[in-house]
Image (cartoon, helix red, strand yellow):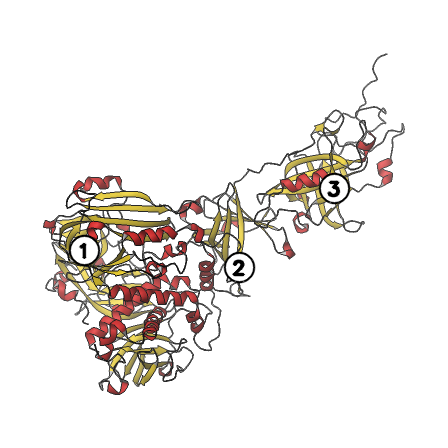
C-alpha cells in the first residue's frame, strides 16, 4: 500500500488547491437578451423535515429530523425565474430536461449562469408566481450562480435577504455590473457572496427558528427573520462599500474586536483591543488587551481585564494564560505553535506586514493587512452584532439602539504571503482535530494508508471514511483518479454520494499529506462546516491522523472591528436588565408539537440562562420540586432527582414512581437536559428541558421550557409547555417554630396556650410560597397515606374511605410508644389545603368509665389542624394546632378556642406500611388520681398500668 503515496508527489499543491474561477444598466440584462445557451445544473435539495410550502399539511414524525431529502420531486415542482432591480419576477426560463440520479436532480435550462436567475421549488406542486409581482415567499430558492448548487432553507433565506435589499434600493447595488454584463467569474463571485450569507444565517438565524409544521410563508413573515435578513444586508453592504483608510493611524489609536460565546461550558462576552506604536507602549510595540465577562449567577455585565500581550516581552508571557496555544502552523523547521496574537513587523499608512506572536519574520509566514472604514452613525447596533462571532451578545442590547456620531467600523482585509498550513494544537488538544473511522469514532486512524479504499463502497455501512461533519462523510478511493466521495445524509438515514472530487498524496516541507478541496455544494450542505476554507489536508502527528486546512497565498480574508467610541457605546447599553423578566413564559405552548417548534419557543422565552455542564452537575442529588398551579391539580407535587450515575428519580406527591433503574439523563449540545424514561427502549418517552431563567437565592428557582414526547407509536402525544422548579438540597428542611406553645409534661398541657386565630396568622407567615406556587396538601396526596412525625412511633392514618359524616374520610391516630393508642378519627381537607381531623369515637365511648368511676378515655374529645409550610418534594414542614376538651376543665382552664401550636417535619408513607402493634389497656380500675389512668395521649411516657400504692399515713 505504500506505493500509492508516491503516485501523488507530482501533483502540485497549487493545482490541487486551486481557487474556483470565478457599471451598466441597473435594470439588468433582459430575458430576451440572454445568450442562447443551455446550462446543466446538478441540484441537491436539502430542506427541514417539517417546513411546508403552499397547502402542505403537517405530518407527525416520531423524532424530529434535522434535514430531509425529497426524492419524489418532479420537473413541475421547479421553475427558473428572472428577477429585476425591483425584486420582482420579470420572466421565466425554460427547463429543457430533468432527471434524478444518485439522489441529485439534473436540470438543464435555457439560461447561462446568472445572479438574477433563480431556481425555485414548491414541494407541493407547480410553483405559483406572476410576472411583474414580487418574488413569492412560499417558494424555496437558490441562485443559478454555479453548475452544482444546493437548494436549502439557508440559500432561500440568503437570496431573499439580497432581493429584499435590491427591492429597497431599486437597483442591484454592488452587483450592478454582475447583473448587467454577467461573466462566469463575476457571477460565481456573487454566488460566493450568497453562500457566505447562507453560512452566516445558518448560525445566526436558523437555530432560532422552529420549523416543523410551519409554512415557509409564515416563516418569512416573522419579525425576527425580516430583522436579521435586513440587518445582515445592511452590514454586508456597509462593509463592502467602506472607504480605504490609513491602517497606521487606526493601529496607533487602537481598535476593538468583539465576540460572544454560549456553550455547555458557560457564556462569555469578549472585547479585545489591539494597538501598535501607540502613546501608551514602547516604540514599534504591538499590544493586545483582552477584556472578558463570564456569566456568573445574576451579576450584571462588567468587563474585566483578562490578559495583556506585549510583542516585546516574548513567549514567556503566555505561561500565565490558559489555552494560549490555539493551533500549529507548518514552517520550514516543522510545526510551530500559533497563539492568535499578532505582532506588526512593518507598517505604512496603507498596509501592515504582520506575523503571529509565536513566529519570526524569517519563518516566512507573514500576512499583509489593509483596512477600510465606515461611519456607524444612526445604524442599528444589532445589525453589526448579529454575526457568527457576536450574535449571542444581541440579547443584552436593546433592539433598535443606534450608534452615535463618533462611532466607526473597520473592515480589515488580510492575505498570506505564502500558503499557511494550519493544524489544531496536536500537542495538547489533538482529539479536536483527529479523524477516526465512521464506524469506530473513538479510535483515530494511525496511518494515512488505513484511510484509503481500493474500490468505492456501495452503501454508507461499507464506507471506510470519516465524518467531516455530522452529516458528511469523506471516502478516499485509490483508483485511476484518486477519487474523493462525499457522502451526505440529506434524508434522515438516506446517505448518498452527492459529489466527488480528487485527493492527492503530496510531500510538503517533509510532511506526507493527503490533500483535497471540499466542493462548494458540500460546504453548503454540511452542518456547521468547521473550517474557513475548503482546502483540507490529512497528516499523521503524535501517532494519529489529524485534519487541517490550508490558507492560500494571496487570497483575501476579512474581519470587522470597531473604534473605541463604538465599543463604548455598545457596552454602555449592554446589560442583563435588557433580558426578558423572570416568570412563566407561555410562548409556543402547544400540542401536538415538534422539537423544532420547541427550539423556537425557547428562543422567544429565553434570557441568557442555559444548562451547562457545571450547573447540571451541581443539580445531582438535589430535589427539583414543582407545585402545580392548574386548578384541576392545584398543589400536586412533582419532584425530579438527578443521580450521579446519570439515572433520575421521579416522585409524585412524595412517592417514588417505578422505572428509576432505566431512566437516564444527559445534557445535549443545545444545552437541553434530556430525560429519557427507558434508556433500553429506542422509542422511549422522553422530555427535553431548556433553562430560560434562573432566580439566584439560597434555594434557586428555575424557569424551564420543556418538550414532552410520550406513547411513541401509539397516541404519539407531544407537548410544549413551561414549568418552574425550585431546587432543594436534601435533608435541609427545618420546621418554622415561631410562636410554638411548647409542652408541659407535668400537666400534660401546652406550656403557652395559643388561639386558633393566632395559629392561622402564624401558619400563613410560615408558608413559603414562590412564583405563585404555594405548598399544600391535596386529596390525592393524602388519601391512602399516613403522616409520620419526628416522633417516629406516631402515625396519622388517612384512609381513602368516606366517613359516615359527610365530607370526611376515615382514619386512625396511632402511637406504639408507652402503652400505645389507636384512636379512630375522621379527616378532611379545608379549602386552603389545611388538613383537619377530629376524634371519631362515639360520645358513649368517650364517656365510658371503670367500676370506680375513672374514665377509660380521660383524654376527652380533640381536634387538630395541620398546614404545610414548605416541602422539598419528599417531606413537609408543617404548622399544627390542636385542642382537647379536657383542657377546658383543667387548672388553669383553657378556652374553647385555645390550644397547642406546634411545628414538625413530616412525611407520607402508604397507610398499609404503618407498623402493627398491640395497644395495652388497663385490666383493673385505677385510682381516681392515678397518673396512669386509661387510654391517654401521653408523649414518651413508659407504660405502667399498675396504680402506685397510696402513700403511707
Residue 600 drawn at (x, y percent): 45, 62
- N-terminal label among 1 and 3: 1
Q: Are marks 1 and 2 in contact (CB under 8 Å)?
A: no
Residue 63 seen in the figure? no
The quadrant the N terminus occupies is bottom left
- N-terminal label among 3 and 2: 2
- Secondary structure under tag 2 reads loop
> What numbered label is drawn on residue 812?
3
Residue 286 drawn at (x, y percent): 19, 47
Judge whether 551 appears above or below 874 on screen.
below
Q: Nearer the viewer, residue 896 or 108?
A: 896
Real-space Cα separation, disc 1 to disc 2, in angstroms: 51 Å
The quadrant the C terminus occupies is top right
- N-terminal label among 1 and 2: 1
Mark 1 surroundings: few (<14), some (14-19) or many (≥20) residues within 10 A: many
The residue singled out by tag 2 in the image is 586
Residue 216 seen in the figure? yes
Quarter occupied by residue 629: bottom right
Amino acid at each position: 500500500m505504500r506505493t500509492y503515496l508516491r503516485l501523488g508527489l507530482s501533483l502540485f499543491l497549487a493545482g490541487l488547491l486551486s481557487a474556483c474561477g470565478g457599471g451598466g444598466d441597473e435594470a439588468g440584462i433582459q430575458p430576451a437578451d440572454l445568450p442562447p445557451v443551455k446550462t446543466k445544473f446538478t441540484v441537491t435539495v436539502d430542506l427541514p423535515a417539517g417546513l411546508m410550502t403552499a397547502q402542505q399539511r403537517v405530518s407527525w414524525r416520531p423524532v424530529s429530523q434535522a434535514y430531509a431529502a425529497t426524492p419524489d420531486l418532479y420537473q413541475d415542482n421547479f421553475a427558473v425565474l428572472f428577477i429585476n432591480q425591483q425584486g420582482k419576477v420579470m420572466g421565466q426560463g425554460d427547463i429543457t430536461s430533468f432527471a434524478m440520479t444518485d439522489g441529485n436532480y439534473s436540470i438543464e435550462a435555457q439560461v447561462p449562469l446568472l445572479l438574477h436567475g433563480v431556481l425555485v421549488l414548491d414541494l407541493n406542486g407547480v410553483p405559483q408566481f406572476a410576472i411583474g409581482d414580487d418574488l413569492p415567499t412560499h417558494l424555496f430558492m437558490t441562485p443559478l450562480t454555479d453548475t452544482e448548487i444546493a437548494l436549502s432553507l439557508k440559500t432561500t433565506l440568503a437570496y431573499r435577504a439580497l432581493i429584499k435589499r435590491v427591492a429597497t434600493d431599486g437597483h442591484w447595488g454592488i452587483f450592478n455590473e454582475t447583473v448587467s454584463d454577467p461573466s462566469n467569474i463575476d457571477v460565481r463571485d456573487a454566488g460566493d457572496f450568497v453562500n457566505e450569507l447562507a453560512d452566516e444565517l445558518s448560525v445566526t438565524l436558523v437555530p432560532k427558528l422552529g420549523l416543523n409544521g410551519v409554512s415557509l410563508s409564515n416563516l418569512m413573515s416573522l419579525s425576527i427573520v425580516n430583522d436579521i435578513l435586513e440587518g445582515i444586508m445592511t452590514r454586508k453592504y456597509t462593509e463592502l462599500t467602506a472607504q480605504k483608510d490609513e491602517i497606521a493611524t487606526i493601529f496607533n489609536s487602537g481598535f476593538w474586536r468583539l465576540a460572544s460565546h454560549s456553550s455547555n461550558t458557560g457564556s462569555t462576552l469578549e472585547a479585545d483591543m489591539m494597538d501598535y506604536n501607540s502613546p501608551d507602549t514602547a516604540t514599534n510595540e504591538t499590544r493586545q488587551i483582552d477584556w472578558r465577562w463570564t456569566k456568573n449567577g445574576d451579576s450584571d455585565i462588567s468587563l474585566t481585564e483578562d490578559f495583556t500581550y506585549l510583542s516585546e516581552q516574548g513567549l514567556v508571557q503566555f505561561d500565565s494564560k490558559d489555552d494560549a496555544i490555539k493551533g500549529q502552523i507548518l514552517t520550514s523547521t516543522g510545526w510551530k505553535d500559533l497563539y492568535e496574537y499578532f505582532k506588526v513587523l512593518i507598517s505604512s499608512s496603507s498596509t501592515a506586514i504582520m506575523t503571529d506572536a509565536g513566529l519570526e519574520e524569517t519563518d516566512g509566514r507573514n500576512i499583509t493587512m489593509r483596512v477600510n472604514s465606515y461611519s456607524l452613525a444612526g445604524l442599528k447596533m444589532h445589525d453589526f452584532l448579529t454575526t457568527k462571532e457576536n450574535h449571542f451578545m444581541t440579547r443584552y442590547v436593546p433592539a433598535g439602539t443606534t450608534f452615535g456620531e463618533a462611532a466607526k467600523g473597520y473592515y480589515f482585509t488580510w492575505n498570506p504571503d505564502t500558503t499557511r498550513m494550519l493544524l489544531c494544537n496536536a500537542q495538547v488538544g489533538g482529539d479536536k482535530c483527529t479523524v477516526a473511522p465512521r464506524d469506530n469514532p473513538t479510535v483515530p486512524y494511525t496511518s494515512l494508508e488505513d484511510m484509503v479504499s481500493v474500490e468505492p463502497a456501495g452503501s454508507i455501512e461499507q464506507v471506510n471514511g470519516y465524518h467531516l461533519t455530522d452529516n458528511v462523510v469523506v471516502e478516499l478511493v485509490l483508483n485511476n483518479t484518486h477519487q474523493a466521495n462525499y457522502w451526505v445524509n440529506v434524508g434522515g438515514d438516506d446517505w448518498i454520494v452527492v459529489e466527488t472530487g480528487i485527493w492527492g498524496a503530496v510531500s510538503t516541507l517533509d510532511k506526507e499529506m493527503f490533500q483535497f478541496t471540499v466542493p462548494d455544494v458540500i460546504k453548503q450542505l454540511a452542518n456547521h462546516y468547521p473550517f474557513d476554507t475548503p482546502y483540507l489536508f490529512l497528516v499523521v502527528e503524535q501517532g494519529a491522523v489529524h485534519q487541517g486546512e490550508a490558507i492560500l497565498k494571496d487570497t483575501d480574508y476579512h474581519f470587522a472591528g470597531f473604534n473605541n467610541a463604538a465599543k463604548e457605546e455598545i457596552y454602555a447599553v449592554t446589560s442583563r436588565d435588557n433580558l426578558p423578566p423572570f416568570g412563566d413564559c407561555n410562548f409556543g405552548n402547544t400540542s401536538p408539537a415538534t422539537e423544532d417548534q420547541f427550539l423556537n419557543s425557547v428562543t422567544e422565552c429565553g434570557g441568557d440562562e442555559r444548562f451547562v455542564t457545571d450547573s447540571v452537575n451541581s443539580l445531582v442529588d438535589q430535589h427539583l420540586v414543582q407545585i402545580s398551579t392548574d386548578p384541576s391539580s392545584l398543589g400536586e407535587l412533582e419532584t425530579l432527582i438527578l443521580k450521579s450515575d446519570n439515572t433520575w428519580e421521579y416522585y409524585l406527591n412524595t412517592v417514588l414512581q417505578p422505572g428509576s433503574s432505566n431512566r437516564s439523563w444527559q445534557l445535549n449540545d443545545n444545552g437541553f437536559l434530556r430525560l429519557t424514561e427507558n434508556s433500553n427502549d429506542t422509542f422511549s418517552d422522553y422530555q427535553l428541558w431548556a433553562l430560560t431563567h434562573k432566580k439566584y437565592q439560597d434555594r434557586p428557582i428555575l424557569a424551564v421550557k420543556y418538550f414532552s414526547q410520550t406513547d411513541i407509536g401509539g397516541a404519539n402525544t407531544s407537548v410544549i409547555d413551561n414549568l418552574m422548579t425550585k431546587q432543594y438540597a436534601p435533608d435541609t428542611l427545618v420546621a418554622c417554630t415561631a410562636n410554638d406553645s411548647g409542652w408541659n409534661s407535668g400537666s400534660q398541657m401546652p406550656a403557652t396556650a395559643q388561639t386558633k386565630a393566632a395559629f392561622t396568622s402564624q401558619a400563613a407567615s410560615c408558608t413559603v410560597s414562590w412564583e405563585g406556587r404555594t405548598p399544600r396538601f391535596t386529596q390525592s396526596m393524602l388519601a391512602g397515606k399516613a403522616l409520620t412525625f419526628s416522633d417516629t412511633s406516631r402515625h396519622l392514618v388517612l384512609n381513602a374511605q368516606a366517613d359516615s359524616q359527610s365530607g370526611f374520610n376515615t382514619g386512625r391516630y396511632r402511637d406504639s410508644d408507652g402503652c400505645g393508642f389507636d384512636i379512630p378519627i375522621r379527616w378532611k381537607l379545608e379549602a386552603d389545603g389545611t388538613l383537619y381531623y377530629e376524634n371519631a369515637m362515639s360520645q358513649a365511648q368517650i364517656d365510658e368509665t371503670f367500676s370506680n368511676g375513672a374514665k377509660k378515655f380521660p383524654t376527652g374529645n380533640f381536634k387538630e389542624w395541620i398546614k404545610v409550610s414548605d416541602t422539598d418534594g419528599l417531606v413537609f414542614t408543617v404548622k399544627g394546632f390542636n385542642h382537647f376538651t379536657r383542657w377546658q376543665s383543667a387548672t388553669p382552664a383553657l378556652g374553647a378556642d385555645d390550644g397547642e401550636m406546634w411545628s414538625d417535619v413530616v412525611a407520607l408513607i402508604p397507610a398499609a406500611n404503618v407498623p402493627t402493634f398491640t395497644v395495652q389497656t388497663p385490666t383493673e380500675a385505677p385510682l381516681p388520681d392515678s397518673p396512669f389512668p386509661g387510654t391517654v395521649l401521653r408523649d414518651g411516657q413508659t407504660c405502667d398500668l399498675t396504680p402506685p400504692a397510696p402513700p403511707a399515713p
